[in-house]
Amino acid sequence: MEEGGTLPWSPLSICTQYARLRGFVRNGHADVIKAGTTVLRRVLDLRLAYAVPPPPALPAAAVTLAAAAATAARAHDDAADAADDVSDASYDTEDEEVEQTPQSLFMASLSEEAREQYGL
């Protein structure tokens, strides 16, 4: 409990209060299901404002780690491209399989715009 005897807010408390205000009652109790559904419907119909604050900025260490991972992924991708160029040049020789890591697959799926936006 907070000072003054009030409870902190919660989604359930909001639905309970909304049900009481609108008269949504079921078996003598506030119908929180109907209240929650009504609130969500109003949000989706743009009749009730809803906003979420932006995420906090990443700490410098996380940005540095992401940049290092991106550099390593680019080096791995460059090596894979070079291996592909060599294998494309000679169809007679046996092609070596290049190991694809999940990180390199993710980086390959990003568009150039996304890479520039996130500094990768």
Image: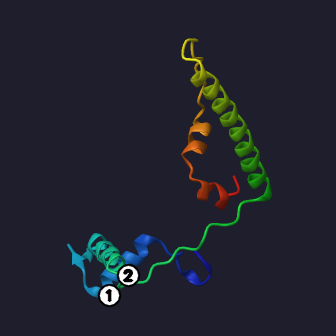
Residue under pointer 2: 17
Q: How many C-alpha atoms fall within 10 Å of the one at disc 2: few (<14), some, or many (≥20)? A: some
Q: Give the quadrant of residue 118.
A: bottom right
Proximity of marks 2 and 1: CB atoms separated by less than 8 Å: yes
Q: Give the quadrant of residue 3.
A: bottom right
- Compared with 110, 100 (above or below) is above
* Mark identifier at residue 87: none
Residue sitting at x 42%, y 75%: 13
Residue sitting at x 62%, y 28%: 85
The residue type indicated by label 2 comes to Gln
Please identify the quadrant where the N terminus is shown.
Answer: bottom right
Pinpoint residue 49: horizontal percent, then vertical percent: 43, 83
Residue under pointer 1: 21
Pinpoint residue 74: horizontal percent, then vertical percent: 69, 41
- Compared with 28, 112 (above or below) is above
Camera-side residue: 106 or 116? 116
Pinpoint residue 62: horizontal percent, then vertical percent: 74, 53
Query: What is the image's colouring?
Result: rainbow
Camera-side residue: 111 or 27? 111
**Seen in the image, is 18 located left or right of residue 78?**
left
Residue sitting at x 69%, y 36%: 78
- Compared with 43, 80 (above or below) is above
